[in-house]
Image: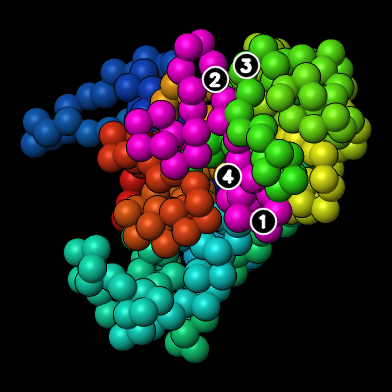
């Protein structure tokens, strides 16, 4: 991915500043007469005339103004017309939400296909196809062949890869289930990252079905710490069968792991002792299901895996349980909850804004976030996130 082809917003900003700088110099030159003082003599009709120096300065200023205006207009037009593929990637936790949204975007269903594009249910009055509508808010024109204004791809790796690749401009959007400050702790500044939160994940603790059936239905926060430090090694110590505990987790580059150890140990780089680490949530869930003695943390979207059972967590005097109406995993106080992020770099382009805006609309929250078993953002948070996007055209 090249800077100019997929990030025209940065080119646009750069050109605007150059043009504005040139304009400022030109105006200053016009006011100062180029640094030379010349007194013009009145003409015969007593009307003042311009000296050659003043005339040349005025001409130069007008030319610079016209050039600045033209260049700014061209930059804005180029940004709106950037139809190269939008590339996103990173966290396996964010992946289901982003992948579903991209599938809808690329299909670009027509307005009369209300099963897939129920715009009327959300107060949206349009006859445009799905992607065409959201892109039109940022200056894109519909394609005659009903293709989306640009395609959107979503890669699957880890949160650390997502934030590094958006920083290195390999991705337009870096998906991460951990904060960039935790994923890239060596940086001095994070001002160039723009953090777009699209959902909330309440990480459940899960065990193999045999363990829950044997009576282990919950643990305490201290027991959780002891498990991941290797201080508790047999299920009998937790009221279960006399069986070795198989503690599982995610790889170190994973945002799921980063968020877990940060929440549990107040340190995103804390060392833990596990039997195996897995690259994606899918593989981790399968490993818990296939064992008869395992425990792990997991992204909420993968809780439906057969033979994977959630257990409660008692933390600071409160017990949190899956689907508890008062103290569920969607509680703000649940210690293992975390935001799901889609990071952009050095601002947010019109292309990036179009897809993120769709995800921050109630349509996107109910279509892409909720079905994946994540928690949707409340209206206050949605408004806060929308304020990070550039103005619509």
Horizontally, is 298 left or right of 145 in the view? right
Horizontally, is 289 left or right of 94 in the view? right
Tell me the tag on residue 314.
2
How would you rate the neighbour count of disc 3 (Cα within 10 Å): few for under 14, some for 14-19, many for 20 or more? some
Count of marks placed on residues:
4
**Pointer 3 residue:** 221
Q: Which residues are magenta?
A: 301-330
Tell me the tag on residue 305.
1
Quarter of the image holding residue 32?
top left
Residue extending furthest toward the left: 45
Residue 335, above or below 338: above
**Pointer 4 residue:** 300
Q: CA distance from mark 4 to mark 1?
A: 11 Å
Q: Earlier in the sequence, mark 4 or mark 2?
A: 4
Q: CA distance from mark 4 to mark 2?
A: 18 Å
Q: Earlier in the sequence, mark 2 or mark 1?
A: 1
Q: Nearer the viewer, mark 4 or mark 3?
A: 3
Q: Say which of 70 and 178 sits in front.
A: 178
Q: CA distance from mark 2 to mark 1?
A: 24 Å
> Would residue 376 be seen by someone viewing this image from the given angle?
yes
């Amino acid at each position: 991915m090249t800077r100019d082809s997929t990030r025209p917003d940065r080119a646009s900003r750069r050109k605007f500043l150059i043009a504005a700088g040139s304009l400022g110099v030109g105006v200053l030159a016009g006011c100062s007469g180029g640094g030379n003082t010349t007194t013009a003599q009145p003409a015969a009709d007593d009307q003042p005339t311009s000296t050659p120096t003043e005339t040349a300065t005025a001409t130069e200023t007008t030319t610079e103004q016209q050039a600045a205006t033209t260049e700014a207009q061209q930059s804005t037009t180029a940004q709106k017309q950037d139809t190269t593929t939008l590339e996103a990637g990173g966290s396996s936790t964010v992946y289901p939400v982003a992948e579903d949204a991209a599938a809808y975007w690329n299909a670009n269903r027509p307005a009369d296909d209300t099963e897939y594009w129920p715009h009327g249910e959300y107060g949206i009055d349009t006859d445009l196809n799905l992607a065409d509508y959201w892109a039109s808010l940022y200056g894109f024109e519909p394609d005659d062949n009903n293709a989306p204004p640009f395609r959107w791809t979503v890669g699957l790796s880890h949160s650390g890869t997502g934030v590094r690749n958006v920083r290195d401009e390999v991705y337009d959007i870096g998906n991460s289930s951990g904060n960039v400050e935790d994923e890239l702790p060596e940086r001095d500044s994070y001002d160039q990252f723009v953090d777009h939160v699209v959902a909330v994940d309440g990480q459940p603790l899960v065990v193999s079905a045999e363990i829950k059936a044997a009576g282990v239905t919950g643990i305490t926060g201290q027991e959780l710490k002891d498990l991941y430090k290797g201080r508790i090694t047999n299920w009998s110590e937790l009221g279960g069968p006399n069986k070795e505990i198989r503690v599982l987790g995610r790889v170190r580059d994973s945002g799921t792991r980063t968020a877990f150890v940060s929440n549990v140990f107040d340190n995103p780089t804390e060392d833990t002792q596990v039997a195996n680490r897995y690259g994606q949530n899918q593989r981790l869930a399968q490993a818990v299901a296939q064992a008869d003695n395992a425990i792990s943390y997991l992204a909420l979207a993968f809780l439906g895996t057969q033979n994977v059972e959630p257990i409660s967590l008692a933390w600071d005097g409160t017990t949190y349980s899956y689907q508890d109406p008062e103290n569920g995993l969607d509680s703000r106080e649940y210690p293992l909850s975390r935001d799901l992020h889609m990071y952009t770099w050095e601002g947010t382009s019109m292309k990036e804004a179009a897809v993120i805006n769709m995800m921050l609309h109630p349509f996107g929250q109910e279509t892409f976030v909720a079905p994946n078993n994540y928690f949707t953002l409340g209206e206050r948070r949605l408004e806060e996130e929308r304020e990070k996007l550039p103005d619509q055209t």
